[in-house]
Image: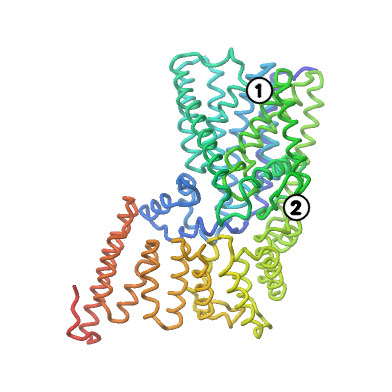
Amino acid sequence: MQTPQSPQRRFLPFVLLVAGLALVAGAYSLALPGYWLFDDWPNLAQLIQVDDIRTALHFILAGNAGPLGRPVSLATFALQADAWDTRPEAMLAVNFGIHLLSILAVFFLAAGLARIGPPQDALRARWIGAFVALLWGLAPFLATTHLMVIQRMTSLSALFLFAGLALFVWAHLTDRRNLRLAALVAGLGLGTLLATFSKENGALLPLLALTILVLWIPREQWLTGTVERLALGLLVLLPSLFILGYLGLGFIETLQRGDYGPRRDFTPVERLLTQPVILLDYLRQLLLPQAVAVTPFMDHIPPSRGWLEPPITLVAWLFWGTLVAAAIALRRLAPWFVFGLGFFLLGHILESTHIGLELYFAHRNYVPAFGLFFALVYFALTISPAHFRVAAVVLLAYALVYTLVLFQVTAHWNDKRVNAELWLEYNPHSIRAHQFLAMQHMAAGDFENARQTLDRAADRQPEVLLSQLQRTAICVNNEDSFPELLAEVERALRTSSLYRPAVAMELNRTARRAEPSPLCPPRTHAALIRLADALLDNPRYGERSFTRSHLLLAKAYAYVEKGQPEAAVPLFKEAVRERPDIHAAFQAPALLANLGQYEEAYEFLDELEALIPASPLEGRLWRQRLEAYRGLLETSEHIDRQEGRLEPADQAP
């Protein structure tokens, strides 16, 4: 039976699309209000400083989540600064809205691709676009991309990428030359910039456009105009060659170096061995979803140490090798197969090859998964025109399964205690899952199980120092054993060979509290100073500016809380010299003013002038703060002199 052609049925694909959007919106709304997760804090904590355009610009341009700073994503967070850190539902609602827009972009991309490919049936192309958008939008395995606030960076980048690719494809379907050129420039030029500055893997847009051009668009439909070919050369070919060259040179350099340094407990070779195993699991979770696999905690997936360690390593390599060979052999008979596979694998080329990132994250599939769903739907709806309706019913049933699993995930997302147990059982290697479960035990007042959970994490991964530190914060009904625990953790801090800067940041945060450990009174500020000293003795932490600065600040704040400001002043100074930080810069002058040592305070303000960052925006902010603080210092000194708290011999510069 042919695709329905009656006028009334031409709009049915759009009905399916709208229904899909409503289903997705309804499913994700069940996950509200949601909550903050591990990567939200280091990336968004400075939102508390955003209260005007100047501070918003500073937040947007000072990002360090990636090498390019991701300012487009940070701009969207800055617009919601008032939601931090009390209203995660406000930020999650924007995440869900971005996903809905991405579904529309996927519809236009898939429909455009189907319109180009045989049988070039406009109605069938709309059906293909609607089903691809439906399955991709409902895919449960991709849900953490939206349920984790910070992963807006992934979805926003993907929105621009899919929109850019859609414009690129539809440029091949219009006869209007000016419109075609505008679509190429907007899609490939502006789309690449916006996607890349949302998250770095947006730079794959030109390479994926090249994939579409080579593996899908027939040669006779390539654009042949001089200006258009120039645009394709500048906006597709050159960026693709740059990306491939960058990855190739990086690959050679990484293999020559032989390791990732202290940040990772696996080598580049082990990472490459492991990736086919991970891609195989991605494929399984995307096509055969299970609710328990939709977890934010995917760290510490054990890497493959050899071809048979574990045996699935060799199996995965043979599987993907066979699949690629079959796709190439069948490229003329089944172009959807080679295109879908090529899009999926090339979509992973940046985050899932040799670059020293963590091994496994579901959100890395947000863009690559499009290739799988397009190939699946295109095959189902074009392989046998006589069975179009049967194929459509099967796809609807498949979408229903996705819907049920997604609703299962989102309806229970806020049941943190149950999820914590399930997620840890699913991934017993995850340190973050241990920490999350411990937090739920603590929220329920079950401090003994919270401590036991952290102890298990430390036993399984003794090199991960954050869990070692967190153990010392809980010793309810076990205070007598704290000295032994403290000594054990000190030894771990001094000797660990794994570099994770979060432990230094956590020490810094803890030391600022008047009561650092309510659940373990023996862990006083003096104990925190011992822990900071132990970590400073570890060259992996003590010789790196970032962590050394945080540890010096931890000691300084601890001394302030102990009532020893004289000991804190030199530590604050050294910390700022090590890593200029505008939020810590004025701690030393403030303490010196309290001690009546104004001359030394002015001298350090002069020193801060030399530490002003080169960035125009940051530099301006520093100068404004310095000028304001100098005025406060002069006022304070004047008052102290008037009230006789300073000796007459004291002179200001």
The one nearer the camera, 133 or 618, is: 618
Q: Which quadrant is the N terminus positioned in?
A: top right
Counting residues from the start of the chain, the first of labels 1 and 2 encountered is 1
In this picture, residue 581 sits left or right of residue 80: left
In this picture, residue 576 sits left or right of residue 456: left
Name the residue tied to disc 2. Answer: 292
Q: Which quadrant is the C terminus positioned in?
A: bottom left
Label 2 amino acid? Val
Which residue shows up at 71% across the image and 74% down it? 446
- Disc 1/disc 2 C-alpha distance (Å): 34 Å
Name the residue tied to disc 1. Answer: 114
Quadrant housing residue 623:
bottom left
Which residue shows up at 58% across the image and 48% down it? 258
Disc 2 packing (10 Å; few <14; some 14–19; many ≥20): some
In the rendered view, would you say 30 is above or below 595?
A: above
Residue 300 position, x and y percent, is 67, 55
In the rendered view, would you say 96 is above or below 633?
A: above
Which element is circle 2 on? Answer: helix
Residue 637 position, x and y percent, is 24, 78
Looking at the image, the residue that sits furthest to the front is 256
Which residue shows up at 49% across the image and 39% down it? 196
The one nearer the camera, 185 or 599, is: 599
Label 1 amino acid? Ala
The one nearer the camera, 123 or 486, is: 486
Disc 1 packing (10 Å; few <14; some 14–19; many ≥20): many
In the rendered view, would you say 522 is above or below 385?
A: below
In this picture, residue 41 sits left or right of residue 475: left
Which is in the foreground here, disc 1 or disc 2?
Answer: 2
Residue 385 position, x and y percent, is 78, 18
